Amino acid sequence: MSIRQELLNAIEQLNDDQLSTLLDLALSLKSGKKSVHSTVESQAYRDWVSPENDIYDEVFADEFTAR
């Protein structure tokens, strides 16, 4: 299987958020940037601070009920 076909098969399995990340990466590569670190890092940061990954309520649940 060619690399292009493998990539197309992988893309078909991604959700919209993952496709957005992949699009950012592809556009960076297309523009000729040698390093895509900032794109990947910024997406990772956005994922990290997203509401879906907010663990503070769980971690500090005991603290909130004690007050």
Image: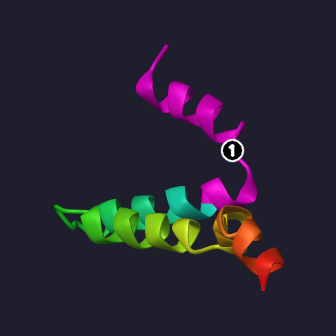
Q: Position of residue 47 (x, y in %)?
A: 57, 66
With 54 as the anchor, is 44 left or right in this view?
A: left
Measuring 56% from the left and 74% from the top, which residue is drawn there? 49
Q: Main secondary structure of the magenta part?
A: helix
Q: Is residue 41 above or below residue 2?
A: below
Residue 55 part of the magenta segment: no
Q: Is residue 2 magenta?
A: yes
Residue shown at the point (22%, 66%) measured from the top left? 32
Measured along the vertical axis of the image, is residue 26 above or below residue 27?
A: above
Quadrant of the image occupied by residue 62:
bottom right
Three-letter residue code for mark 1: Leu
Q: Position of residue 54 (x, y in %)?
A: 67, 69
Please identify the residue farthest to the right as the structure is shown: 65
- Horizontal relation, residue 18 to residue 40: left or right: right
**Residue at position x 46%, y 64% in the image:** 44
Question: Element under label 1?
Answer: loop
At x 16%, y 61%, the residue is 34
Q: Which residue is mark 1?
A: 14
**Residue 40 pos. (x, y %):** 38, 62
In the image: residue 67, left or right of residue 39: right
Say which quadrant the C terminus sits in: bottom right
In the picture as drawn, the residue positioned furthest to the front comes out as 66
Q: Residue furthest top?
A: 1
Q: Closer to the camera, 53 or 55?
A: 55
Of residues 45 and 61, the one drawn nearer to the viewer in this rendering = 61
Q: Is residue 44 left or right of residue 56?
A: left
Q: Is residue 45 above or below residue 13?
A: below
Q: Percent position (x, y) of residue 29?
A: 31, 60
The stretch of residues the image draws in magenta is 1-19
